[in-house]
Image: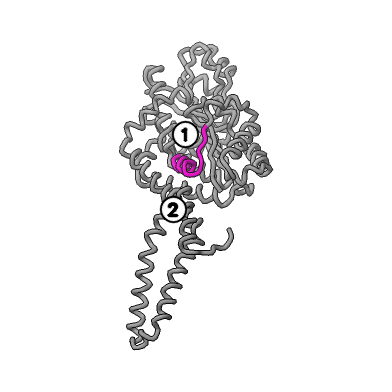
Amino acid sequence: MPILALGVSHRLADVELLERLAFAEDDLVKAYRRAADDPAVEGAVIVSTCNRVEIYGSVPSYHAGFQALKRLLCESRGVDPVELAQPLYSHYEHDAAEHLFAVASGLDSMVLGEPQILSQVREALKRARSEDAAGAELSGVFHAASRSGRRVRAETGIGAAPDAFVEAGADLAAAALDGLEGRSAVVVGAGMMSSLAVKHLRGRRVGTVRVLNRSLERARALAERAHVDAGDLDELPDALREADLVISATGATGVVLTASVVRSTLEGRAGPLFVLDLGVPRDVEPSAREIEGVTLVDIDDLRGSVGLRASELAADVERAHAIVAEEVHRFVVRGRSEHLAPLIRAIRERGDAVVGAEFERFRSELASLLPDEREAVEALARGIVAKLLHEPIVRLKELAPGAGDANARMLVELFGLELPPE
């Protein structure tokens, strides 16, 4: 059954819309139930990350599938369809596979080659399968996309720059604070982005760095590796009073740092506060940027800066796109092979039958041959038939579905084959 991809990403949507579209754990359970109840959707996998929300569905037709997946997205997230008129995109059949392969390879990410997306694609399939929502078609294309992602990371260097956002944000902070050396910083969160932030700050010789996280154990683990201080989120207001720079990247579903907390911490202190919000959904209440003395920069503000990475890594990007094209072709050919397996088997059996019939017809003429000689003649005959059939079979697998199906039907007629019902 054809695959349709429908979604919204950082390319056309702002952070506010992506926040509203993002699926939490409970949302996924309800969404997969909706998908199971819709006759126009045979299977679904939802990919919900910081920079995109996409639904991949096995659908009987494009139009019915598009309406079903759009309805699923809007009703599950409480978003008016009108709001998606401009940012919503869709990809069908071959294009859907190509898009997913590019996503898993980090080529469609805001941060080129970001390392998290491959694991997020794998986790999306795992989650869908736990809800018995992903069928064979979706499982196959997701496994193939993961292979493409692994190859891109192994064979190119685009995954070597996952810290582009941190670097761009740190550059802005350095400009706003007249340098970072000797400054005091607070990093909120203990995940990959927070770890990169600590590394960057240490490299820029920031005076003190304190890692705060809801899980004190995780905060301490990161702090010990980086030789900085650690604490839990309850210490955030006090830590802000001493900080020049705050970097937040928790991945929480709600606001971690409110405007009121920021405002209260600025009372009685001198000097500006630079806040870098790397969270999606956002960690910092947007209205905090209106507070005097506060500079708030979020993901939307950094998009132009990190876009420069593509030109810097042009050769690796070109190679990565070539890998994606190779893997898409490999996936399509494998899928065609499975679809055409009964026909290919019937053609080869017809070839074997012709060879057998001809040997039976000339049995008396071949009777004088020694066993080794007869075996050599049979091998030669079967080899000739196999070579004659090989090229048409390979071409049939590689043809696009529409043309390939038409040629497959023609072969059935030409060979006079009777195939078992699908």
Write the start and end of the magenta stretch as one range.
Answer: 89-102
Left or right, 414 with reference to 422: left
Circle 1 residue? 193
Image position of 242 (left or right of 254): left
Magenta highlight: main SS: helix
Foreground residue, 296 or 183? 296
Q: Residue at the location (54% across, 17% down)?
A: 288
Q: Disc count in the image?
A: 2
Would you name the residue on which mark 2 appears?
A: 333
Position above or below: 334 against 172? below
Q: What distance separates the C-alpha of mark 2 from that of mark 1?
A: 38 Å
Residue at (46, 40) in percent of width and height: 99
Location of the C terminus by quadrant is bottom right
Can residue 82 be seen?
Answer: yes
Give the image quarter of residue 84.
top right
Q: In the depicted view, which residue is nearer to us: 78 or 345? A: 345
Q: How crowded is mark 2: few (under 14 residues within 10 Å), some or many (20 or more)?
A: some
Where is residue 218 drawn, in percent x and y?
A: 53, 38
Q: What residue type is labelled 2?
A: Val
Which amino acid type is shown beneath numbered disc 1?
Answer: Met
Relative to 43, is 164 on the left or the right? left
| Residue 311 magenta | no
